[in-house]
Amino acid sequence: MAITNNKLSQEQYEQNFADIHPPYESITAAKVDANRCLFCYDAPCMKSCPTSIDVPKFIKQIATENIKGSAKTILSSNIMGAGCSKVCPVEKLCEGACVYNLLEEEPIPIAKLQRYSTEQAMKNNWKLFERKNSPSGVRGKVAIVGAGPAGLSCAHSLSKEGVDVTIYEKESKGGGLMTYGIAAYKVTPQFCEDEVNYILSIGGIEVNYNQELGKDISLAELKKNYDAVYLGIGVGVARQLEIPGEKLDGVADAISFIYDLRSKGYSSIPVGDKVAVIGMGMTAIDAATQAKRLGAKEVTMVYRRTEAEKPCTQHELDIAMLDGCEIIWLATPKKLKGSQGKVKQLVCSKMKLGEPDASGRRSPVDTGETFTLDVDMVIKAAGQVPFEKLVKKYKLDNKNGKLTIDKNCATNIKGVFAGGDAVNGGKEVVDAVQAGKDGALAILKYLNLSQA
Amino acid sequence: MTQKVRQDSFAFLRVLATWRLNKIFMADISSNFLGIKSPNPYWLASAPPTDKKYNVLRAFEAGWGGVVWKTLGSQVKNVSSRYSAVDFGGQRVMGFNNIELISDRPLDINLKEIAECVKLFPDRAMIVSLMADNDKKSWHDLIKKVEDTGAHGLELNFGCPHGMTERGMGAAVGQDPEIACMVVEWVMEAATLPVITKLTPNVHSVVPTGRSVVKAGTNALSLINTIQSVTGIDLDTLVPNPYVAGKSVFGGYCGPAVKPIALKFLTTIAQDELTKNVPISGIGGISTWKDAVEFMLLGASNVQVCTAAMKHGFRIVEDMCEGLNNWMDEKGFATLNDFIGKSVDTITHWEDLDINYHHIAKINQDKCIHCGLCYIACEDTSHQSINSEYGMPYNKYTIKDSACVGCNLCQLVCPVDDCITMEEHRVAPEYVNWIEWQKRGLPLNDH
């Protein structure tokens, strides 16, 4: 039993990390599904999309073979429409609302159709957006911190309006959690890079990589050099378990684990034989399934509530179960035991459900009973916490590190706006894209550039 | 030897087919058209599927009641390509178009094969379509030769809308009642077999030619032939289809798209005092037993099919027979004659419609899937009679009874069967038509 890398052959890695949702092979195939769409009015799918993509319209456009128009319909509402088609939990958004569900029929595969059009757009590098020209030259200069979904969406919206944007990104690549935090079988690193490049191809957006706020750049500098600042800094730090043994070798956090896997290549990532994953969110699933796909013999997911309260979607849970991950409901880690500095055992408390908490879900209560799992690796995926220290350093209003904004996306500091995970504490990519759009609108208004 | 085995196997299949039909169903779907008998009312229309023995034997093996052999007559040369189609909503061949001419095979081969088919399947109807050059002798010579094959009837092709018309044949004959009359008179001089005259729809009304040829002695009518059309243009080459070396021509349109037009023409023939006295063979977009029943309800004694077979093969006749049989059993019709023509009198003049009849749409909320299609159709293009109540993600749609004019649009666009129904709410109990309405000076413009 050991944590090692190179558990599998290159072929096995490629097979295990191949695209989990294969695309349409031809326009004929896409049209079969597109023609099934009823073209609903005030469509439930569109209402259920955080970015309000006009789903019936873009699907109709596939049916009429106006693929360029279809891509523009999608990307006008959601500039990361390509990535979202791969990572959105569509079963609880657009596809979950599809009226075919009410007929007990399969919903329209909206994500797959969206992927078809957006992939064509990226592959052919269709230029779908133009920057607004201003007779007087530059219409303003905005700094954005973070090249994740919120930052990129905000930047693109501003650039369309003729505003010059400079993005400061602490990593060496753009895309944020899309690039660094999502299972590779959903989006490949190459795809993420291509998508960022496609978004930036509108022009007017300069990205300075390896520039971290509070280290390489300061908020004061940005405020001085730009007309406005948008903070799309996301969340980053993995929530600690606060239990004995957390510092033992073999205890990793899911974000770093997935980050390494995305940035360094599958064969170089060490993984244990017996892996426990703490948590049941999307990130927990991504960590568990990928540990398994890297060659772990046993992966056990431990969650403190029951299946009914799980934060991940059923679809995601199914992936984990099909990958052979074991699930233990109603258990919470109590202690990590090790020998020679290496983690060997995970001791869990058995829980039962008590009264509903603030989230409306029944909260787990310790029964006093415990059980022990033999492990050689523990991956913590019990949520992420915001950059509380950084936020407090700049005296930005916040709630436990989550930035507080008003209805105009403005923070308490004049000219500084924020959105995305940094504000909501960590939601879907599609929510961050919408936050970026909202932020851009607010900034345009602030700069007196909005048309309204 | 081979021929013998083949004959035996056909005989066996015939027995099997008859046995199956008699065993399972109560209704009798056998047809008698001018004394020409066939086990069911389904003939294959004169077209490529009835071009030669090979196809026709396959059709008979599949269970078709009869065939109208592809038109014989004047010598022709065909081109390539010959067909084009209109697709709709992801489905292929909603409408079909051809520029193929009449048979381009040697006459003696056709005649020999017709005789062989008649011998192999004596219980099936064999009609031969004819289009001779425009002189009496050509017609008489052709009829004599065809009658020698043992075929059961003749169909005069006065409808082909392309290629032959330029030479004064096909639709050129059918479009002119006088010429049509003259040709039928020639034919009746020579023919001993029953004669069916096939009418072209490329006219404002089929009745003048229909009356003319009935007067001239035709024993029956068939309709419609194809409708002149341009099915579409290739948006890369900018040349319409079918494509022949950079050019195209008007073709003959058929398939499901033309059915409503065919039914209208059929009705006018079935209602005319003169033409209603001869049997009618219905043609035009018939693809299913339901289509066939509709043609027969409007006066067709039997039906002819082509496009549906060209799209799916001869096997479609199985369901056409079984569906017809089940429907007849369900409705209590023992024979085809029990329902042929039953709907003819229900099509009336607009002036005779009852203005006091009124119905209102009703949405069954248990069946509604909240697609909003009824709402937007009514709101944008009709009478703003549907109320939308916002819901996340599902809006609730209800009918504003007082605003609904009972147009059916919502019901037609609703994707769920029986979700929107029309409920009768008469304005007044009394029947009042438009003429009476005017006479009494009753109010207009109620919306």
Image (cartoon, rainbow, N blue to C red):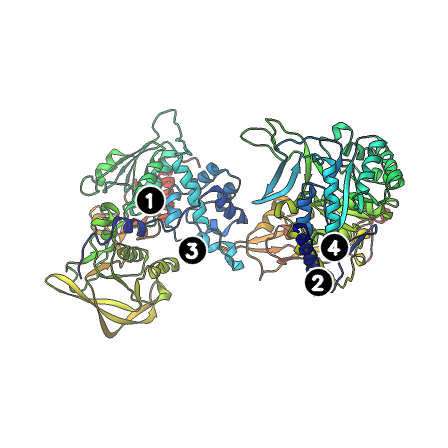
Q: Which residue is mark 3?
A: A91
Q: Residues within 10 Å of mark 3 (few under 14, many from 20)?
A: some
- Alpha carbons under labels 2 and 3: distance apart: 53 Å
Q: CA distance from mark 1 to mark 2?
A: 70 Å
* Residue that badge 4 annotates: B40
Callout 2 crowding tier (Cα within 10 Å): few <14, some 14–19, many ≥20: few
The residue that label 1 is drawn on is: A149
In the rendered structure, which amino acid carries the disc numbered 4? Asn
Q: Is residue B112 left or right of residue B413?
A: right
Q: Tell me if residue B197 can be seen.
A: no
Q: Residue at x 83, y 37 (%)?
A: B209
Earlier in the chain: of badge 1 and badge 3, it is 3
Mark 1: which amino acid?
Pro
Both on one chain, marks 4 and 3? no
For the residue labelled by badge 4, is the local secondary structure a helix, a strand or a loop? Answer: loop
Q: Please tell me whether mark 4 or mark 3 is closer to you in this view.
A: 4
Q: Are marks 1 and 2 in contact (CB under 8 Å)?
A: no
**Residue type, label 2:** Trp
State the CA–CA distance, disc 4 to disc 3: 51 Å
